[in-house]
Image (cartoon, helix red, strand yellow):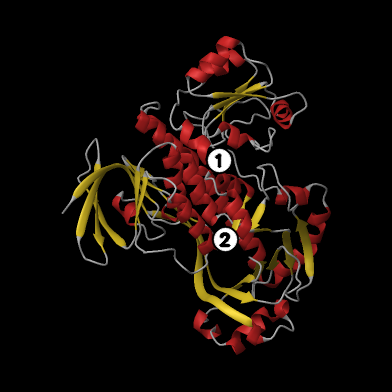
């Protein structure tokens, strides 16, 4: 049995694991990804990313590639059982507060191919496919051993590492190792998921369609140029096998396909999924962390499943890089679960609420929806609130200094405006700490910020950033490498003194931006 040493081992090469590896590589951290499958899992699963996750995709350096395979979603249409529109919420397909469309539809295998191709740009990332991680052992104060087997040869191997990131899905071996259990949030529904390629244009509204009917709740979305997704709630006793014949499936999708011939429909996938709401009771044991579906499962009603895992990676990677470089204390890693767990829980509960509101309640529920939904749509600002896509603020931690000041932005993401020459805020900052200020720093203050590894972003008069500061009743703010506001206030000298030391990864980060 051979054994080598690598700073970080990532178990699982799905979107969460590939995102974590790329972010770490941008900071110069070597990592090994261990994946059970040889290549990309060919079946489509997730189909939606919001503007915040599109911003992370851009941070990975693949904004143009993702734009080429995705299409903006124009909003949400709620329908009754007879396909009559109850209400409609429109979404602007142009750039939102994060600099990208607020809703993006895509094919997951295509996205993962892009993520994998991008990983190859980094010599510090090694990806081993077709291996089975069998255990984690010999947990010392300095390292941990990861045991795995090559599935093609049967050879047993091991690697020693300082940190393990478990991105290995709902049946996570890593989660089992840290003896975490999944808390059931009391939501479980069985759904039929259907992906179809259709050469003809269905000429439907280019947003998500949700049929609000407890007898047969359904969802329709156009995912790509020729790819369409339907989801239907299964009745008791039904299974996916009941709909594998075109004659059985066609009546379900015919309200959208209408006159399209059955022969023109190419079935890509038909599968049964159980939508669940669960969250792990612990996300870390010393040097081992869980991310993505290993840490949380959410119903798909607000399209946040994949995005939640990519947020986990964005939150943890820079902290891990800082600890490995010696800039940040080991205690900085405690903030990962403290920040991400309440945020993930809030989004799971939101998805659960939306799912229940759209699919439960029997005939009384249908009556309430027919009465209430059209009224809500007419309320000023309600549609904007539904469609704004803003996620909850992160809770306070040692890396988020919450303020009691009304309108404080701490814990929230800073907007990502164009700062000139086509470069947005996140690209200019490039994974560093930043001090955003409407007051010009003194030469000494600027030197102090740069010596900490940070950068200064001067909010010009009447700019998006100055207006953002003003709405938060502040003249300056410390922005973390993940775009989260650490602290804001009016005294620039106080903020300069609170800026953490963080020197890792600048040249690599800057060179990967596009």
The local secondary structure at tag 1 comes to loop
Q: Earlier in the sequence, mark 2 or mark 1?
A: 2
Label 1, residues with CA under 10 Å away: few <14, some 14-19, many ≥20 = some
Find disc 1 in the rendering and name its residue.
513
**Left or right for 467, reference 67:** right
Of residue 161 and residue 510, the one placed in the foreground of this image is 510
**Left or right for 152, reference 106:** left
User: Does residue 15 appear in the picture of this structure?
Assistant: no
Of residue 147 and residue 209, the one placed in the foreground of this image is 147
User: If the image is split into quadrants, where does the C terminus sit?
Assistant: top right
**Left or right for 155, reference 278:** left
Residue drawn at the location 51% of the way across and 41% of the way down = 512
User: If the image is split into quadrants, where does the N terminus sit?
Assistant: bottom left
Disc assigned to residue 308: none
Residue 78 drawn at (x, y percent): 73, 65
Question: Which image quadrant for residue 133?
Answer: bottom left
Are the residues at dot 2 and dot 1 in contact (C-beta closer than 8 Å)? no
Question: Which image quadrant for residue 5?
Answer: top left
Find disc 2 in the rendering and name its residue.
300
Q: With respect to residue 275, does 471 lie above or below?
A: above
User: Does residue 292 appear in the picture of this structure?
Assistant: yes
| Mark 2 vs mark 1, CA separation in Å | 31 Å
Residue 288 drawn at (x, y percent): 33, 44
Q: Farthest residue toward the left?
A: 1
Q: Farthest residue toward the bottom?
A: 247
Residue drawn at the location 54% of the way across and 45% of the way down = 61
Residue drawn at the location 69% of the way across and 81% of the way down = 254
Nearest-to-viewer mark from 2 and 1: 1
Residue 433 drawn at (x, y percent): 53, 28
Of residue 436 and residue 423, the one placed in the foreground of this image is 423
């Amino acid at each position: 049995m051979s054994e080598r040493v690598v700073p970080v081992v990532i178990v699982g090469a799905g979107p969460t694991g590939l995102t974590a590896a790329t972010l770490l590589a941008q900071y110069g951290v070597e990592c090994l990804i261990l994946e059970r499958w040889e290549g990309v899992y060919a079946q489509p699963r997730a189909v939606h990313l919001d503007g915040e996750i599109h911003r992370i995709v851009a941070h990975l350096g693949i904004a143009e590639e993702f734009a080429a395979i995705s299409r903006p979603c124009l909003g949400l249409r709620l329908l009754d059982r007879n396909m009559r529109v109850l209400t409609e919420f429109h979404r602007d397909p142009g750039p939102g507060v994060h600099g990208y469309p607020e809703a993006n539809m895509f094919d997951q295998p295509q996205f993962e191919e892009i993520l994998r191709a991008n990983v190859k740009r980094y010599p510090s990332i090694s990806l081993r496919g077709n291996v089975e991680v069998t255990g984690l052992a010999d947990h010392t104060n300095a390292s941990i051993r990861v045991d795995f087997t090559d599935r093609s040869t049967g050879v047993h191997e091991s690697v020693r590492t300082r940190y393990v990131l478990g991105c290995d899905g709902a049946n996570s071996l890593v989660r089992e190792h840290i003896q975490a259990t999944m808390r059931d949030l009391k939501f479980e529904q069985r759904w039929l998921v259907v992906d179809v390629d259709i050469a003809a244009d269905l000429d439907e509204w280019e947003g998500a369609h949700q049929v609000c009917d407890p007898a047969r709740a359904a969802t329709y979305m156009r995912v790509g140029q020729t790819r369409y997704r339907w989801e239907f709630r299964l009745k008791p006793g039904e299974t996916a096998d009941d709909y594998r014949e075109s004659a059985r499936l066609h009546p379900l999708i015919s309200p959208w396909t209408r006159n399209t011939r059955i022969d023109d429909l190419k079935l890509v996938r038909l599968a049964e999924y159980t939508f669940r709401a669960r969250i792990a009771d612990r996300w870390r044991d010393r040097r081992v962390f869980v991310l993505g579906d290993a840490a949380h499962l959410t119903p798909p009603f607000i399209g946040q499943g994949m995005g939640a895992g990519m947020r986990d990676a964005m939150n943890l990677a820079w902290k891990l890089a800082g600890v490995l470089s010696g800039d940040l204390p080991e205690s900085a890693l405690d903030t990962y679960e403290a920040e991400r767990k309440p945020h993930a829980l809030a989004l799971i509960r939101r998805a659960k609420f939306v799912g229940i509101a759209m699919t439960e309640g029997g005939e009384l529920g249908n009556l309430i929806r027919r009465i209430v939904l059209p009224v809500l749509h007419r309320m000023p600002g309600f549609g904007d609130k539904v469609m704004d896509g803003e996620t909850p603020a992160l809770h306070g931690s040692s890396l988020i200094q919450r303020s009691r000041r009304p309108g404080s932005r701490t814990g929230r993401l800073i907007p990502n405006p164009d700062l000139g020459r086509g470069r947005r805020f996140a690209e200019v900052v490039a994974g560093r700490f930043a001090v955003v200020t409407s007051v010009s720093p003194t030469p000494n203050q600027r030197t102090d910020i740069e010596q900490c590894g940070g950068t200064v972003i001067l909010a010009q008069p009447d700019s998006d950033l100055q207006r953002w500061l003003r709405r938060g009743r502040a003249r300056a703010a410390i922005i973390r490498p993940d775009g989260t506001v650490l602290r804001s206030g009016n005294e620039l000298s106080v903020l300069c003194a609170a800026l953490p030391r963080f020197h890792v990864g600048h040249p690599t980060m800057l060179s990967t931006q596009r």
